[in-house]
Image (spheres, rainbow, N blue to C red):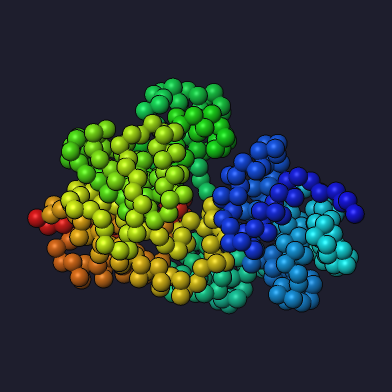
Amino acid sequence: MSVKISKARQAAFDALWRVETEDAYAGNLLASNRHDDLSPEDRGLMQELVLGVLRWRGRLDAEIERLARRPIRKLDAEVVLALRLGLYQLRFLSRIPAHAAINESVNLVKQQQRKSAAPFANAVLRAAQRAPGGEPVRADAERDSIEAAAIETSHPQWLLERWRARFGPAEARELALANNRPSPVAFRFNTRIAPEERTRAALEAMGVEIRPSTIAPGAAVVVAGSLSPLSEPVREGWIYLQDESSQLVAHLAVPTEHRTNRRARALDLCAAPGSKTSLIASLLPPEAMIVAGDLHPHRLRTLRELSGRLRISNIHPVQLDASAELPFADAFDLILVDAPCSGLGTLQPHPEIKWRMNEAKIRELAALQKRLLANAAGRLRPGGLLTYAVCSTEPEEGEEAIEAFRAAHPDFRDMTRERLTEIGVDPAPLLTSGFGARTFPHRCQTEGFFVCTLWKRK
């Protein structure tokens, strides 16, 4: 039987199904050209639905269980996704008519060969409609149970417990809620293709208002207007969309004395997709050599495509396993270890991560990160600079990794404070009580990064 479902909701359901069943990443699916047939309005709604459902999944599921009077695990996965989509629209999208949210969600259930479950889905969503504003009531943060806080902030309990232990209940809640907000749009100018003045004029003509970043030199943040990957400045390579914290890492990795050194040799051990690598290349002279390593050939292809689009010619991709012995005879002046990590600092653009990660995985990643650091240290010349970064909020992947590294490598000195000062960034809000610096979504309005720059004594 044919049922009526809008293109945006159908695309959102399909994307959420792949996230749920294939461990796909929502960001990749939303950027895919498979949705090029959608109108800008439909594409915008699809993105809102996918990211919104993933961000608020915990709260949505709690209400579904209450209304359905049964655990989520006892419902068919297709029915759960349709209910999440419908309930998200009822609770968070005031411009969507309730009848449209309910009817199309019920039709999604029918389309998925779950016709017998359609009356059940309709009953649950009608009950939600009769009880508007079904958000959990917030108690005092200090006395809130962890279960209530996890539902209110839509974060897994184990993660919220960690943050409460480190920051206290109030700030842990603030961090979690910040993760559920859309990411600020930040970028850098690419003067290899277009002069900055020309790009600024084009943005102004588009109605895009920007401000300078407070933590990354030369970075800009959109404060009004719309700037998408499909807009001309992005498509043509005049600018490159990149979070401020990510840009900060690259600036810290290239000291001033190397920015005019044509013989500089830099190594990015985990380079793809190339955001930081390409910025490092733009900070060094065109004659400098940047070796970009990555384990996966398809990711190196992405890096090559980015280099071509940004017109960067001094990046040399190399397939390698950075956790094993590195295939280089000569030492490097600069090494960046942008290590594989939990990604818990990037929950704004990648909310599915919080539902996939666990403490065992964090421990596994921390062990890998320590191996990468040790391998990198052996290929850095005396007097060189090693920069370590992870987009994680967790200390095992940040401060504790550096503490273990420095215990085994006493010839390395933490230079993060000096490097921040050198690039004109106030170190005080960013430095940790131990090693390196951190950014957080609720403190800096950026992604959550840990970064530490280490100088190898001569």
Is residue 322 in sight in this rendering? yes
Is residue 389 in sight in this rendering? no
Q: Which residue is more in the foreground, 303 or 232?
A: 303
- Is 65 placed left or right of 445 in the picture? right
* Residue 280 location, quadrant: top left
Task: Please report the residue visible at 71 percent of the width from the left and 54 percent of the height from the top.
Answer: 13
Q: Which residue is more in the foreground, 365 or 120?
A: 365
Task: Please report the residue visible at 29 percent of the width from the left and 52 percent of the height from the top.
Answer: 336
**Residue 318, horizontal then vertical, whole percent:** 33, 48
* Residue 286 location, quadrant: top left
**Residue 105, horizontal then vertical, whole percent:** 80, 56
**Residue 97, horizontal then vertical, whole percent:** 81, 49
Task: Please report the residue visible at 24 percent of the width from the left and 67 percent of the height from the top.
Answer: 405
Image quadrant for the C terminus?
bottom left
Give the answer, above or below, for where 252 lies relative to 401. above
Give the answer, above or below, for where 120 lies relative to 193. below
**Residue 213, horizontal then vertical, whole percent:** 40, 41
Residue reaching furthest to the left: 458
Image quadrant for the N terminus?
bottom right
Task: Please report the residue visible at 87 percent of the width from the left and 51 percent of the height from the top.
Answer: 3
Count the marks: 0
